[in-house]
Image (spheres, rainbow, N blue to C red):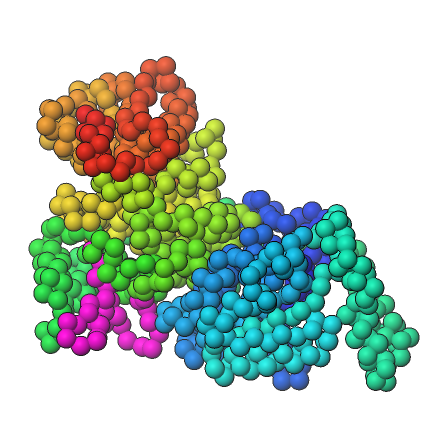
């Protein structure tokens, strides 16, 4: 919702204590010794929750005002995702117990593309909330921009006509007319389960903020506004004229009482106990705050359970007319599980989903083409070749009306869909919510959601999330827009201090202290464990996961079933894999660190050139950086005096700048900075992330691994 009026909504609709609001303005933090957030936010960005009890009926309504940044409309899909998840967990399939209300400014509703992207979800099967109530606070101005310059249509609400939503235009100065329109809109939404719009046409009494002078840019408009009584005076006079009360009674019973209450709350503000988790749903009660200690946990599953679930999710009924190639894929998956070898990426993912669902977690993955997978590796929905039917294996081994597994193709939007999934992820700690980009590069269409919500929502608003962003990434000669998920952008938003290296401990999971985790995984088993780790921690953090494209079917990235077994867990790094070729650690003179799929090119080149003095380590988790593992490898190879960071990306892209700083800090801590040489192997700097010429790509790839 817009900033203007937000404090009013917090205080009078959601009943946020006035003393708490004043306390935030005063900057007091009494009772906040164990705070969740680090940075906080301005007061008109904050949210809260409140349960209202109506005296006449005794009915209870739980209200949530979600925090939102100054990118005002960015919160629209977040609210819709929050409502949809709430409906899921309340088994509200009729969509009558949870309703989303979005309050828009007139300039924002007509000008921000995310509004259109969100409205287009209204009737989509896996995104609908049964209708959203849109309220446009139509001040007939956007900061200093008049409607003539702000939109091409007559009304800001014209956008809603694209989905046939009814629009109520009402005079803001007529309180009873506004009330009637709101009731009509609510009744329409509840009866027809469709979006509805209320266009409240009014004006902005003062400037954009306390220091703004609106007559600089709209002098004639504000000459008229300054002559008008405000809505309180208009309504008060109306009630006096109707004999409801006298002017004296209005002052004594309303104005004076309200002023006295506000002064009392202001004086109490310094003593108000801070409640840093006031907005958070009760489903998060079991999740630890960042200051609590947490240990690494095994995420493996018994082999018998893997075989049992594998058979269920890899078997297509004989009477279902699946495409013959799809049937072969599923037969190969089942065989790999039964034989215990060659489990590929798609099979590992399906096993992760199945085991989590079997443990009563909810799994949802959405994005463009996720049902099949952009690279034809998932096939979560199998289509009949003769009738319009689908078979969804992961839906077939649980019963009940509530769906525990949802894989859904989204409409062609990154911004709104990622925002929706973020909103979905913050409702309940027991759901694994994944948004997958068609290509990793395309996430930048949702950069606002990443910057304002995913990377910093917990620091600003105490809002935890376990969302996974799955970004296909890897240099395969596909050109500038289909190669890079922009690892460097996520790494520069990581909130660690390179001057403070954590204590080395295999049992201490320090991810809880930071804003998120960034991974670039190179084996199917590690992918399985990463997904399960998201749910089996005592805290939740977003995970930015770069998924290598060419490893989806790569035989060397496939794993044996014991790597999914009971004593296994996620590996933050993978040590030298070819211990027969690198048999004597003392002969190693160079350690190559890399991440993702480039490992396989490096290993192939090393063998072809018989370089038995080079050890290759794969960094699977880039952030939080695995200082302890790297220190262990330096000790393991005592004669290695050169450490190389190798990457596919250009030097100004990828993880080099991030890793370079942290390796130098580690060398300082270990007292070996003067003994070690740190080198770079990769593409040279470039403004474009990748070449569009196939031959150039292959030459660059050859050069960086040799």
x and y percentages locating residue 325 in the rendered image: 11, 62
Q: Main secondary structure of the magenta part?
A: loop
Q: Is residue 447 visible?
A: yes
Residue 53 is one of the magenta-drawn residues: no
Q: Is residue 466 left or right of residue 460?
A: left
* Rendered view: 181 above or below 568: below
In front of the other: 462 or 221: 221
x and y percentages locating residue 648 in the rendered image: 27, 34
Query: Which residue is at 12% across, 73% downward?
Result: 321
The part of the chain drawn in magenta is 377-406
Query: Which residue is at 56% across, 49% downward?
Result: 460
* Rendered view: 67 above or below 568: below
Looking at the rendering, in which quadrant would you find the N terminus? bottom right
Q: Residue furthest top?
A: 674
* Rendered view: 14 above or below 187: above
Residue 383 is one of the magenta-drawn residues: yes
x and y percentages locating residue 308 in the rendered image: 17, 64
Q: Using the rendered view, name the quadrant where residue 53 is placed.
A: bottom right
Q: Is residue 266 left or right of residue 490?
A: right
Q: Is residue 350 visible?
A: no
Looking at the rendering, in which quadrant would you find the C terminus? top left
């Amino acid at each position: 919702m817009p900033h203007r009026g937000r404090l009013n909504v917090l205080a009078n609709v959601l009943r946020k204590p006035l003393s708490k609001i004043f306390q935030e303005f005063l900057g007091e933090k009494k009772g906040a010794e164990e705070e969740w957030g680090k940075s906080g936010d301005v007061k008109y960005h904050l949210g809260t929750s409140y349960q209202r009890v109506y005296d006449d009926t005794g009915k209870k309504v739980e209200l949530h005002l979600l925090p939102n940044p100054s990118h005002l409309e960015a919160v629209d899909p977040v609210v819709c995702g929050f409502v949809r998840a709430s409906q899921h967990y309340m088994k509200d399939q009729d969509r009558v117990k949870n309703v989303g209300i979005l309050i828009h400014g007139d300039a924002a509703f007509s000008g921000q593309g995310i509004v259109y992207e969100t409205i287009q979800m209204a009737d989509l099967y896996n995104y609908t909330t049964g209708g959203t109530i849109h309220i446009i606070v139509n001040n007939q101005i956007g900061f200093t921009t008049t409607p003539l310059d702000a939109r091409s249509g007559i009304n800001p609400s014209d956008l809603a006509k694209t989905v046939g939503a009814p629009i109520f235009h009402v005079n803001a100065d007529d309180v009873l007319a506004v009330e009637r329109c709101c009731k009509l809109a609510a009744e329409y939404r509840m009866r027809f389960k469709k979006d509805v719009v209320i266009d409240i046409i009014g004006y902005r009494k003062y400037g954009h903020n306390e220091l703004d002078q609106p007559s600089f840019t709209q002098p004639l408009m504000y000459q008229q506004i300054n002559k008008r009584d405000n809505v309180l005076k208009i309504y008060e006079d109306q009630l006096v004229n109707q004999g409801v009360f006298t002017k004296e009674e209005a002052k004594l019973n309303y104005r004076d009482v309200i002023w006295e209450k506000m002064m009392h709350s202001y004086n109490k503000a310094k003593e108000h106990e801070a409640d840093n988790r006031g907005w958070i749903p009760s489903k998060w009660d079991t999740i630890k705050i960042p200051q609590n200690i947490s240990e690494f946990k095994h995420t493996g599953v018994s082999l018998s359970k893997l075989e049992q679930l594998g058979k269920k999710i890899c078997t297509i009924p004989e009477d279902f007319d699946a495409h013959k190639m799809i049937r072969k894929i599923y037969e190969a998956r089942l065989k790999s599980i039964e034989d215990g070898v060659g489990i590929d990426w798609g099979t590992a993912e399906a096993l992760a989903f199945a085991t989590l669902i079997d443990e009563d977690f909810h799994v949802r993955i959405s994005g463009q083409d996720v049902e099949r997978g952009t690279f034809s590796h998932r096939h979560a929905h199998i289509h009949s070749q003769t009738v319009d039917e689908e078979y969804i294996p992961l839906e077939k081994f649980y019963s009940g009306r509530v769906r525990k597994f949802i894989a859904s193709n989204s409409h062609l939007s990154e911004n709104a869909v990622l925002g929706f999934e973020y909103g979905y992820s913050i409702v309940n700690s027991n759901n694994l919510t994944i948004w997958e980009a068609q290509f990793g590069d395309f996430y930048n269409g949702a950069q606002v959601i990443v910057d304002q919500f995913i990377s910093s929502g917990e620091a600003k608003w105490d809002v935890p999330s376990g969302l996974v962003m799955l970004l296909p990434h890897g240099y395969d000669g596909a050109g500038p827009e289909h190669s890079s998920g922009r690892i460097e952008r996520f790494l520069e938003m990581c909130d660690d201090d390179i001057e403070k290296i954590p204590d080395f401990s295999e049992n201490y999971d320090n991810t809880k202290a930071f804003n998120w985790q960034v991974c670039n995984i190179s084996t199917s088993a590690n992918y399985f464990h990463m997904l399960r780790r998201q749910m089996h921690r005592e805290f939740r953090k977003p995970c930015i996961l770069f998924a290598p494209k060419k490893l989806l079917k790569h035989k060397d990235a496939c794993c044996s079933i014991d790597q999914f077994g009971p004593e296994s867990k996620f590996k933050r790094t993978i040590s030298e894999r070819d211990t027969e070729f690198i048999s004597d650690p003392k002969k190693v003179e160079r350690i190559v660190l890399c991440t993702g799929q480039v490992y396989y090119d490096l290993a192939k080149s090393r063998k072809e050139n018989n370089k038995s003095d080079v050890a290759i380590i794969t960094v699977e988790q880039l952030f939080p950086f695995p200082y302890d593992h790297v220190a262990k490898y330096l000790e393991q190879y005592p004669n290695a005096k050169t450490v190389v960071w190798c990457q596919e990306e250009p030097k100004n892209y990828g993880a080099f700048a991030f890793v370079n700083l942290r390796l130098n800090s580690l060398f300082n801590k270990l007292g070996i900075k003067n003994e070690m040489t740190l080198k770079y192997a990769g593409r040279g700097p470039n403004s474009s992330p990748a070449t569009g010429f196939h031959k150039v790509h292959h030459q660059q790839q050859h050069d960086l691994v040799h």
